Amino acid sequence: MSAQQEQKTTLELGSAYGALVEQPALIRLRLLAKHVKRWKSRKRSRQLGGHASPFRGRGLSFHHVREYQGGDEIRHIDWRVTARTTTAHTKVFEEETERPVLLFLDQRQNMFFGSQRCFKSVLASHVMALLAWTALESNDRVGGLIFNDTGHKEVRPRRNHRSALSLIHQAVEYNHALAENPAASPNTGQSLAKALEELRRINRPGSSVFLISDFQGLDEEGIRQLHLLSRHSDVFALNIHDPMEQQLPNAGLLSVSNGQQRLHLNIGKNLRQRFSDHSAEQQTNLKLQLRKMGIRLINLTTDQAFFPVLQKELGLS
C-alpha cells in the first residue's frame, strides 16, 4: 500500500458518520490502532511521577527505600523510616510496567444530536473504540464505564480483546437505545456526577482516564468528583460537540425535530448572537474548571475526522 493510500485509509477509519453506531465500524478501528507507534510523554509538574501520557511505561511507581545520599531530592525523603532509624532515608521510584486505561462514555439523550457528518453519540463511541484498541496494542489493561440517562454498565480493566469487545457491545446497545425513544425526558436520577462517582469506584491510582462526553449538566458535585478522580490519575476530557451548539445557522426559519415532534424557530441576528455568547461562556467555564484540576481538555466536533485531532493532541505518531 502506498503512503497516499495508507493516509486515505487512516482518514476513513478515523472518521465517524451517521446517526447510529455500527458495531463492525468500531471493530475495524483495531486496524487503525495497529498503526499507533507511540504516545509521547507529557510530564505533569504538579504530581510526583504523574504524566499525561495515556499508555504504559510513562509513569513512576514506588520501588523501595534506601539511605539518603548526596544529590537525592529532599521531597522524596521517607520521614517515617527516617524517624524510626534516626538515619535519613529516601524513596526510590521505578518506571511503571503498565498503566490501566479507563474509558468513560456518555450516551445520554443530549448526545443524540448532530447537524453534520454524525451524531455526538456516534463520534464519542468511535473515539472510545479507538482508545480501547490502542491501549491493548500497548499491552495495557483496558476497561471503562458506559452510561445513559437511566443507568450504566461497567467493564473491569483486563488485558485481552474481550474487554474491548465488551465495551463496544455495550456502546452499541446504549447507542441504539437512544433511537428507540428519542423524545424521552432524561432521568435526573442518573446525572453526570453520579456516573463519575461510579467511575471513581472502579478506578485505581495511576490509571489513565478518558472522559468522552459533552459535559452537559456538570454541576458542583460533578466538579467535586472530577477533582477526586484527578488527584491520583491522569485524566483527559474529550469534549464532544456539534458546530450548531456553538453557532446557530443564519437560516431565518429553522426547523428542528427530535424524531417524533417538529418545531419551527425564527432565528434572528440577536438570538444567534446571544446563543453564541452563551455557548462560548459555557466552554470557557469548562476549560477553566478543568485547568484548575490539571485535566487536559481536547475538543472534538462532529464535522471533522477525530483521528487527526487525537494524533495532534495526544502526541500519537
Image (cartoon, rainbow, N blue to C red):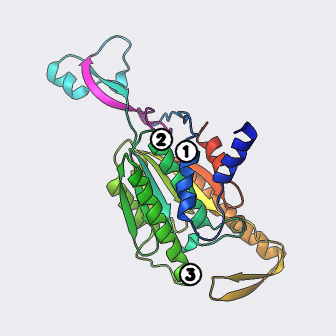
Q: Residue at x 40, y 68 (%)?
A: 152
Whether label 2 touches label 1, CB < 8 Å: yes
Q: Earlier in the sequence, mark 2 or mark 3?
A: 2
Q: Earlier in the sequence, mark 1 or mark 3?
A: 1
Q: Nearer the viewer, residue 288 or 34?
A: 34
State left or right for residue 255 relative to residue 211: right
- Give me the disc on residue 137: 2
How far across and how far down the image is residue 183, in percent? 56, 84
Which is closer to the viewer, label 2 or label 3? 2
Magenta stretch in the rendered image: 47-67
Amino acid residing under circle 2: Glu
Q: Residue at x 83, y 74 (%)?
A: 269
Q: Which residue extends farthest front?
A: 1
Q: Residue at x 47, y 44 (%)?
A: 135
State left or right for residue 83 relative to residue 174: left
- Is residue 3 shown above or below 170? above
Amino acid residing under circle 1: Ala
Is residue 138 visible in the rendered structure shown here? yes
